[in-house]
Image (spheres, helix red, strand yellow):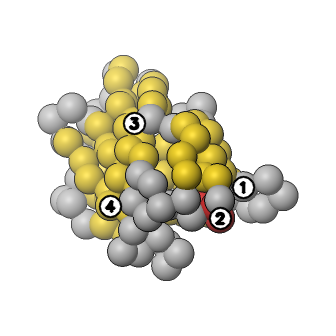
Amino acid sequence: QVQLVESGGGLVQAGGSLRLSCAASGSFFSISAMGWYRQAPGKQRELVAHITDGDSTNYADSVKGRFTISGDNAKNTVYLQMDSLKPEDTAVYYCFANVRRADGSYSYTRWGQGTQVTVSS
C-alpha cells in the first residue's frame, strides 16, 4: 500500500507564495499520476493540478499561470508551487496518487491527509 506525506501548507498574504510537497512511500508497483485537489468550506472538492509519470500536466483554469506542478519520479514526490496566491485559494489541499498494477492497469487511488492553505487579504 502507498502512504502519502504532505507538507508545506500555511498562512500567507495575498500575492504571496507557498510550495506544497507530497511524497509517496510503501509497497507498490508504480504510480501513474500524482496531483492535488482542494476543498474550501461549503464547496466541493476540485482538481487543482496533476502530473503523469510521463510529465504531462493539467491545471484547473483558476490556477493556470499561477501554480506549477512538478514531479520527481525517482523520489515518488510531487510539488505544487503556488504563486500570486489569492484569498479564494484558501482551502484544504489533498495530494493523491494513482497506483498502477504490474500489467499497467489502474489499481487504486491513495489520498493524503490534507494540508491547510490560508490566504489572507
Which residue is drawn at the image coordinates 41% and 42% (left, top)?
Answer: 20
Residue 39: percent from left, percent from top: 68, 54
- Can you say whether 23 is above or below 70 in the image? above
Instruction: Indicate which disc residue 40 carries.
Output: 1
Q: Residue at 84% of width from left, 58% of height from top?
A: 42
- Circle 3 Cα neighbour tier, 10 Å, few/some/many (<14 / 14–19 / ≥20): many
Q: Name the outermost residue toward the top.
A: 26
Q: CA distance from mark 3 to mark 1?
A: 19 Å
Residue 88 numbered mark, or none: 2
**Label 1 crowd bin: few (<14), some (14–19), many (20+), radius 10 Å:** some
- The answer to whether residue 104 is visible is no
Q: Which amino acid does the dot numbered 2 rest on?
A: Glu
Picture quarter with the C terminus: bottom right
Is 74 located above or below residue 104 in the figure? above
Badge 3 or badge 2: first in the primary sequence: 3
**Picture disc at residue 68:** 4
**Label located before the other in sequence (3 or 1):** 3
Residue 58 is left or right of residue 45, and the answer is left
- Residue of label 3: 22
Per the model, the C-alpha gap separating discs 3 and 2 is 22 Å
Where is residue 82 drawn, in percent x and y? 41, 56
